[in-house]
Every structure is written in structure tokens, then in C-alpha cells.
Image: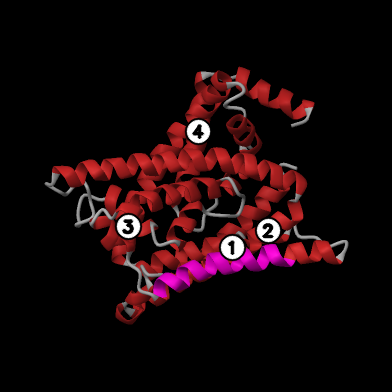
Amino acid sequence: MDEQKEKEVLTQETKKTPLSFVIDMLKGVTLGISAAVPGLSAGTIAIAEKCYDGLIDNITNLKKNFKKSFLWLLPFALGAIVGAIAALIGIQKGYNAAPFTITGLFGGFIIGSIPVAISELKKANNSKELTFHILAFVVCLLIAGGLGVTTAITNTDLSTFLLERAWFMYILVFIAGFLAAGACIVPGISGSMCMMVIGMYIPVINTFATRTGELSIWASDNTIFKVTGLILFVILALGAVVGVIVASKVMKNLLSKHRVTTFYGILGLILGSLVSMFINSSIYPLYPTLPVWDYVVGSILFVVCAFISYFLIRFTNKNTSLEK
């Protein structure tokens, strides 16, 4: 971080007032909502709200200057928790009622975020650089798209393993939290979308954000089931914290040293995630049973949300730029 940016961050840290705390907390609410909605990028929202640089710098400086960084991040964290919980509860109810409608809405946001990556792509200077660009794109595309398609083909339902509290689910829950929170740092990438790609999004919502259903820890009378559920929540939160810290450092390094190659990878992740959004173990088996109106509304929302996301990106690009 250069001297000018360091001064700007320090100024932001020392000018905290009750009003600025509330404003930052409201920004945190929008970040929490965007983090919880597959297809919305918390990183993009942070850029639009002009707090992306501050978030990255203070997260990476937590160890170096814990008190100041913690106090700067506190209102954002509190707001994000409130926003995420509210969004997850609403999404859970909506997905159960109209899965393709909600998926179409999410998919539209993903399509609209493509300009974030495309705007950063540049022609390679030599064959070696071109090879790295193509490799980053293809690998990320196959990973993001392949995960969802694989769960659909193999009919892998992680809800069953989560219900049985299989030992490997504790590891997978940590990975889910790590990916979800870490991806939020990347502009244009949705953290919750990553959870949906690996098949953990709906099971996690049904476990922690609803009071009905066999997965819900709040609806169970089994004390052991509740305790293990709370342990899973702690593991999920721990994975999220580690994910944010690691991703902040990695993204800061990648964007400063390998910016163009990184965005080729991001483009691959976005396109691959779009495939996995519509072909995964949660929604793929439901397609033959869905009513026509669900397909119609979902298709309309896909187009509408794509335009909303696209114009949000244009607004972002006019008012600020990604950290370089």
C-alpha cells in the first residue's frame, strides 16, 4: 500500500463517529445481503460503496495493528451478520416455494457481473503470457462448472450426510465457509454461489436458517443433534474468518502481480458457476416436476437481474476502480 492510500485509510480510522458507525453498519448490511445471495458479489458492492480498499487494507493489517483495524471493521461485520441472516431466511422460504424462480434471479446477477472480469482482460504480450491466461480461464471454468454438474450426475445429496452428521461433513462445512467468505473478497464472484456449486448452500440454509424440516437444529428435540449443529455453525464461522483473511492477502498479491491472469481466472469462475447454478444436485432433480409459471417467472427475473447487475457494474466503474 502506497503512502497516500495509507494516509487515507488512517484518516478513515480516526474519523469514526456515531453517525459514521451507523452508516458503515448499513453498508455492512448490504454486504451481508449480497454475500448471502448467490450471484451477487459482496466485493462488487463494496467497490460501489467505496469501502473495498479500506476493507482489504484493514483485514490484512489486523495482525499488524489489531485495535484500529478491528474498530474500523466492527460496524461492517455487525451489519453483515444482520444482512446475511435476513437474506438467508428469505431465500430459504423462496427456494422451497419456487426453486427455478430463485435460481433464475441468481443466474441473472451472475451474467450481469461478467463485465467486471472482461473490463480487466488485456491482450497477452507473448506466447507464455497467453498460455497462462488460457490456462487460468480453462481450469477455473472446469472447476466451477464441473463441481455442479458432477453433483447432478452422481445425484450427490449432501443433506443426507449432514443429517447423519458424517465425519467428513465437519471438514466440508469448514471448506464451505472458507470458500464462501473468501470468494466475497473477489469482485464479481459470489461467495454463496461457491457454496451452491459444491452443493452446500441449501443444506446449510436448511440447517441454520429455518425452524422447520429434519435438517433444522431449531426444530429438533435431540440434544446431541442440536449440539453438533452448533458445533458445525462454529466450524462454518471459523472457516469464513480464515477464508476472509487468506483471500484478502492472496487477492492483494494476485491483483498487484498477476492482475490480468487473475481476471481470466475470475471470468472462468463466473461462467462455470453459471452452469453449476442451473445444473446441481439441489435443483436438477426438480426440473420435471416444476410448474410452468416457475419457469416463466424465473426466466423473466434472469433477464431483469442481469440488467440490474450490469448497470450496477457500470455505475461502479464510473465512480471508483479496483485496487491496483
Badge 2 is on which residue? 117
Image coloring type: secondary structure
For the residues labelled 2 and 1, say whether their Cβ atoms are less than 8 Å apart.
yes
The kind of secondary structure element at disc 1 is: helix
- Residue bearing mark 4: 76
Q: Label 4 amino acid?
A: Phe
Give the CA separation, mark 4 to mark 1. 26 Å
Q: Kindly report the distance in space between the C-alpha atoms of the residues bearing marks 3 and 2.
A: 30 Å
User: How many numbered markers are drawn?
Assistant: 4
Real-space Cα separation, disc 2 to disc 4, in angstroms: 25 Å
Q: Is residue 23 visible?
A: no
Residue at the far right in the pictured view: 125
Q: Which element type, helix, strand or loop, lies under badge 3?
A: helix
Q: Earlier in the sequence, mark 2 or mark 1?
A: 2
Q: Is residue 22 above or below residue 40?
A: above
Among the two numbered marks 2 and 4 on one chain, the one whose residue lies closer to the N terminus? 4
Percent x, y of residue 227: 22, 41
Write the start and end of the magenta stretch as one range.
Answer: 134-152
Q: Residue at x 21, y 49 (%)?
A: 211
Q: Main secondary structure of the magenta part?
A: helix
Q: Determine if residue 62 is in view.
A: yes
> Where is mark 3, residue-wise?
203
At label 1, the amino acid type is Ile
Residue 270 image label? 1
Q: In the rendered structure, does residue 84 fall within the stretch colored magenta?
A: no
Q: Amino acid at mark 3?
A: Pro
Q: Which label's residue is closer to the chain start, 3 or 1?
A: 3
